Every structure is written in C-alpha cells, then in structure tokens.
Amino acid sequence: MSARAIGLPAEMGVTDSAMLVSKRMIGDKWRTIAPEVEFGIVPHGANRIKKRLEGVCQELGYTYIDPTVSQDQSIGDIIGKIRSCRTIVTESLHGAIVADAFGIPWIPAVFYHPVLVFKWNDWCRSLGLHDPFDVVTRARIFLIDQIRRVGKVLGRQWFLASMITHSMLRSTVVKCTQDRLMLSDRVVMKAKTDELVHLLSKIREDYRRGLI
C-alpha cells in the first residue's frame, strides 16, 4: 500500500523494518524468555489515559506494557515484557509487530488513542494478513476521532478522556481480549525478514563503496 501510495510498484514494498527485532534479539538472554502470563496490554505511547489503563490491567491480572522508552525502561525491557505474554492486546502498531516477529499471537485494540488504519492495513497486507479492524471497530475509531476533534476545537484536550469511565475502559479491555487472534504465517514472516536482511546488506555495501 505504501509503495502504491507514492507511485512505486507494489513489489518494492517489503514489510516494516521493525520485524528485524527477531533477528537482533537472539542472545541467550532472549532465548530463555518463556510466557508467564496470558495477556499483555500495550497502549499507544501517546495514550493520555495510560495510567488509568494500567490500573485496569492490575485489577484484571493482565500485564501492562508501556511502550515508552525511559530512564527506568529500555527497549530490551519492553521486548522482554512482550515476550513474557502468551497473547498481546495492543493499541500500538509496533506492539503488534514485535509480538508477530517473535511468534506471539496478538489482537489489535482501540482504547483511546486515534488509530491510523492505513498503517495497520499496510503492514498486515505485507504479511498476507487480513485487515485487522472490522466494521464495528472502524466505526468506533471514527467516533473517537470525532470526539477528539471536538475537544481540540474547544481547547480541552481532556474532553474525550473525561467521557471514558473506569467501567467503560475495563469493559473495553475485557472485550478486546476476546477478539480474534492474529499472527502471520511463519514461512511468510521468515521470507520477509530474510528479504529485509538482504536489502540491508546491499545498502551497507553500497554505502561502503560510496554509492550512497
């Protein structure tokens, strides 16, 4: 989809380069991580109600995974938390990408942050997956976006957050865990990551030769 959007042949698109995380994190530390909990919940990094979502996860016994790198949390810590879960429910596209790269089933979710459906569809189709959001969810995405727009016009960024009660958020999280699981075919995933590795090697060689 991205290739066609900028006027290039579709075959020039491979997949999101973040899929290479499975090639990078291959040390002994990463091999020994085994699933410990059923569900990991990953919000979008810019989600304004992350703290409330964390509280809901604690109530439900789910692992809350903030995808934001900080002084207290490295990218390795985030990946480790994702790998400790049997299923990832994620509002963050890269939460889904990391889970898929390591063969962990994932469920796309919408808790609060607006979702860019094009990006999700683009990545999913690159791996032969169906579009992740059904008609009902797309309608909810549209509604959330419209409410956020109203709040922006009013100069009140908290407008949407104030409409989401604790029980609504809890209900949304539980419902998301019951939605269909997604995971790319392992043969397709390997072929795509191998292609990315090949292209990266070619770029390095072209750079070494002064061609770029």
Image (spheres, rainbow, N blue to C red):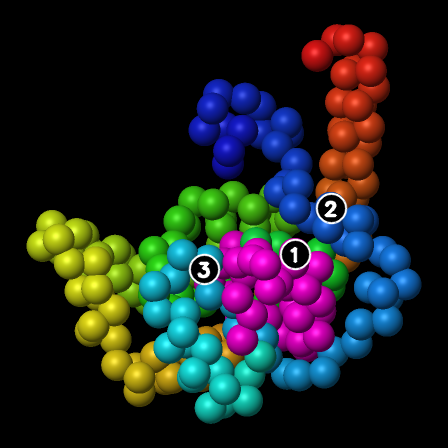
Residue for point 73% across, 64% down: 103
According to the picture, the residue beneath numbered tag 2 turns out to be 20
- Answer whether residue 129 is magenta in the image: no
In this figure, what is the number of numbered marks? 3
According to the picture, the residue beneath numbered tag 3 turns out to be 44
Residue for point 85% across, 56% down: 26
Looking at the rendering, which quadrant does residue 86 occupy? Answer: bottom right
Report how far apart the C-alphas of labels 2 and 3 lie in the structure.
21 Å
According to the picture, the residue beneath numbered tag 1 turns out to be 75
Report how far apart the C-alphas of labels 3 and 1 lie in the structure.
15 Å
The kind of residue tagged 3 is His
Whether residue 180 is visible to the viewer of this picture, yes or no, is no
State which mark lies toward you, 3 or 1. Answer: 1
Circles 3 and 1 in contact, beta carbons < 8 Å: no
- Report the magenta residues as a range: 64-93
Query: Residue 124, percent across and down?
Result: 56, 50
Vertical position of residue 145 compared to residue 64: above or below = above
Secondary element at image label 1:
helix
State which mark lies toward you, 2 or 3. Answer: 3
Looking at the rendering, which quadrant does residue 107 occupy? Answer: bottom right
The kind of residue tagged 1 is Ile
Vertical position of residue 179 compared to residue 131: above or below = below
Dot 2: within a 10 Å radius of its alpha carbon, few (fewer than 14), some, or many (20 or more) residues?
many
Judging depth in this view, the residue of 127 and 90 nearest the camera is 90
In primary-sequence order, the first of circles 2 and 3 is: 2
Whether residue 197 is visible to the viewer of this picture, yes or no, is yes
